[in-house]
Image: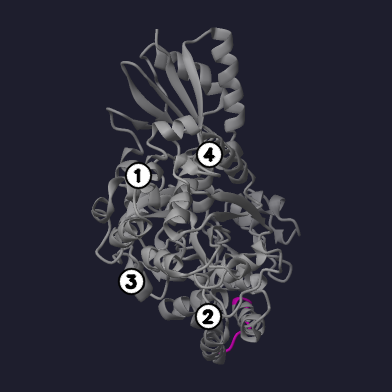
Amino acid sequence: MEKIIAKLGLGSCGIAAGAGEVWTELEKIVHDEKYLVKLEKTACIGMCFEEPVLELSGPGKPTVMLGTVSPGDVKSILDGYLSNTLEYNNIILHEHKEAVHNDLIGNQQRIVLRNCGVIDPESLDDYEAAGGYQALRKALTLKPMDIIDEVKASGLRGRGGAGFSTGMKWQFAFNARSDKKYIVCNADEGDPGAFMDRSTLEGDPHAIIEGMIIGAYAMGADEGYLYVRAEYPMAIKHLRKAIADAEAKGYLGQNILGKGFNCELHIKEGAGAFVCGEETALMQSIEGKRGMPTIRPPFPAESGLWGKPTNINNVETWANIPWIITHGADAFRKFGTEKSPGTKVFALAGKIKNSGLIEVPMGMTLHDVIYKVGGGIKDGKKFKGVQLGGPSGGCVPASLLDTTVDYDSINKTGAIMGSGGMVVMDEDSCMVDIARFFLNFTQNESCGKCTFCRIGTRRMLEILTRITEGKGVMEDIEKLEQLAVKIIKGSLCGLGQTAPNPVLTTLRYFRDEYIAHIEEKRCPAHSCTALLKYEVVPDKCVGCTACARKCPVQCISGAVKQVHEIDQSKCIKCGACYTACKFNAITKV
């Protein structure tokens, strides 16, 4: 009798949520009960908020996916599925029936994430069964320029942030004359709230490797580097095994597939410097030097690693290549818009229900991304804004939710597509403090080479801190805008040139919040601690004493069943009383 398959997501997010314990229980029960069940491992399918995620399938049975599975659920789930009596309160996907997240997957178009959460990322056999390395076989029968022309025809734009034509970038490297060329995968993902590269590398490492081999053949390179953050141990582990397996099967190394083409790939572990996401700083780091940007020109296609022509693309860009070569440029252009074809991977984070990884066609509106795919805002709160492009990006307000997700439309808002981070904010988010948070990040990550980036961002951060503490003056707004312009013009690399974006976009769309902080000494979102005050609402206070018992500095007084009072001179604004009160008798003002 054919076995059913129980497939468990064991990506970083799954393990953090307890998937390791679920796997141990699965192994134990299947062994002890002698079930006809085959256990398989996979990575995250994107629904990080539902981890641990277990998928069940089998002959004559529907494929179902179950979320937030605990070790204690395992036996009843297997028994129910095997006996066709499965009852579980969190069936998140169902092949034939309505399930809570059917639409979440149905509204996506998965090209880059096509194998994530589907195959075992450590199995070359699984990747080949899903069509893996067929694109490489096809590419090696073509002329290099034919491959580059196909990539150009697809309209694929670099998914690392700037959106430059991938095909044109490849042609520049192809045209460069040299005895040695390099290719690089930029997996130095450092944006707060971004995890696109990590999940893709963990879930489908061979797709990136296959894309790089095809690119190397097209551009005439024979060596490449994957620059991956050392904080991604599982991604690195999967990549190392994928490279070794590809070499053993003849997809990498000498005389690939008997075509006389040679290519070697190496992994370089980055030390976590955000600035090394900038391509010239990244190359300095690969060479063993301090990761600091260098002046361009010359561009990497002319003089990159060790002075040789070098092409750099990010994880998502490389992962698109095998699909494009297999299916063709026209098939890729069926998705997206004329100027931004294809799909885009986003990491949804912040105050959103369905936090995780998604892939949607370019041209979908921000509204549909956040509400149809992301499930809307947590706890019934109002949407306020979304930070796109991480610290280098900007904040898009609710009034622009109909903006389509494509490079040109996003740029018009003052934000950037970036690598795909989306941090969603609700009515409780203070936009001045959000700007301060992102500027603090870029200020800390500045390499210090450029004076305006090193010192200008520090001055901006000091001003924003003063404003959030209620010490700002109206002249500070003009100073912020003046400093922003000078930092953009006076910085060598993309870090400094984009660092002011969060400040400029919040000033553009939420200037009233800056004014409230400065003139009224009030934070409209009740978020900035220095401007916050907790008060008892007399009509609601029942004198239960819960607030007084929780107060760490004993600044709340009042008899039992009598209205309590907060001594503002002692209050440290920790919020313990606000959290403890079950009668909404304490308010933030």
Of the residues under marks 4 and 2, which one precedes in the sequence?
A: 4
Q: Position of residue 401 (x, y in %)?
A: 32, 65
Disc 4 crowd rating (10 Å Cα; few below 14, some 14-19, many 20+) is: some
Foreground tag (1 vs 3): 1
Q: Position of residue 378 (x, y in %)?
A: 44, 51
Identify the image's colour scheme: rainbow, by chain, secondary structure or one colour.
Answer: one colour
Instruction: Give the residue pinned by disc 3.
Output: 408
Q: Amino acid at mark 3?
A: Asp
Disc 1 crowd rating (10 Å Cα; few below 14, some 14-19, many 20+) is: some
- Nearer to the camera, 307 or 231: 307
- Majority secondary structure of the magenta segment? loop
- Disc 1 from disc 2: Cα separation: 35 Å
Instruction: Give the residue pinned by disc 1.
Output: 138
Q: Can you say which quadrant of the picture contains the N terminus?
A: top left
Q: Can you say which quadrant of the picture contains the C terminus?
A: bottom right
Residue pictured at 52% horizontal, 46% vertical: 201
Numbered disc 1: secondary structure: helix
Instruction: Give the residue pinned by disc 2.
Output: 297
- Disc 2 from disc 3: Cα separation: 25 Å
Numbered disc 2: secondary structure: loop
Is 21 positioned to the left or the right of 289 in the image? left
- Disc 4 from disc 2: Cα separation: 36 Å
Q: Amino acid at mark 1?
A: Lys
Q: Give residue 380's mark.
A: none
Magenta residues, as a range? 468-473
Q: Position of residue 460 (x, y in %)?
A: 60, 82
Foreground tag (2 vs 3): 2
